[in-house]
Amino acid sequence: MTEILDSAQEAFPYLWVNGEKYIFSNEVLESGKRLYNSFCKIQHVARNVYTRACHDNSSSVVMQIKIDITKTLEEFDYNWITFEQVFLLIERL
């Protein structure tokens, strides 16, 4: 499945696996891009959280950090589920 995610987020329209060609719909490609972007956003938020926590650890900043992390992880989870759903619909030639 990671090969399909790599191909989808890089917008390759198909992938050969064990001599069989798998064609990706635009939905798979878009879903892969969204999932990859969500993953990158997690990395960005994690770096940002560290910086914010080092400069200000007041309760309001800590609460906002929790909100940001929760929102980012929920978005990633939603995009992962969507990718898995469209992944199962890949047409095999």
Image (spheres, rainbow, N blue to C red):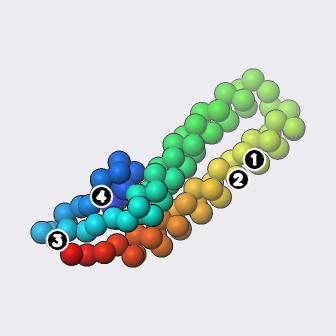
* Distance from Cα at disc 4 to Cα at disc 2: 33 Å
* Distance from Cα at disc 1 to Cα at disc 2: 6 Å
Relative placement, left or right, of 3 versus 44 is left
* Distance from Cα at disc 1 to Cα at disc 4: 38 Å
In which quarter of the view is residue 60 placed? top right
Does residue 30 lie above or below 90 as drawn? above
Q: Which residue matches tag 3? A: 20
Pick whichever of labels 1 and 3 is earlier in the sequence. Answer: 3
The amino acid type found where label 4 is placed reads Pro
Pick whichever of labels 4 and 2 is earlier in the sequence. Answer: 4
Relative placement, left or right, of 17 versus 11 is left
Q: Which residue matches tag 2? A: 70
Does residue 73 lie above or below 47 as drawn? below
Pick whichever of labels 3 and 4 is earlier in the sequence. Answer: 4
- Of the 4 image quadrants, the one containing the C terminus is bottom left
In which quarter of the view is residue 4 placed? bottom left
Q: Which residue matches tag 1? A: 66
The amino acid type found where label 1 is placed reads Lys
Q: Position of residue 21 (x, y in %)?
A: 20, 68
Q: Secondary structure at mark 3?
A: strand
Q: Nearer the viewer, mark 1 or mark 4?
A: 4
Q: Position of residue 59 (x, y in %)?
A: 87, 38
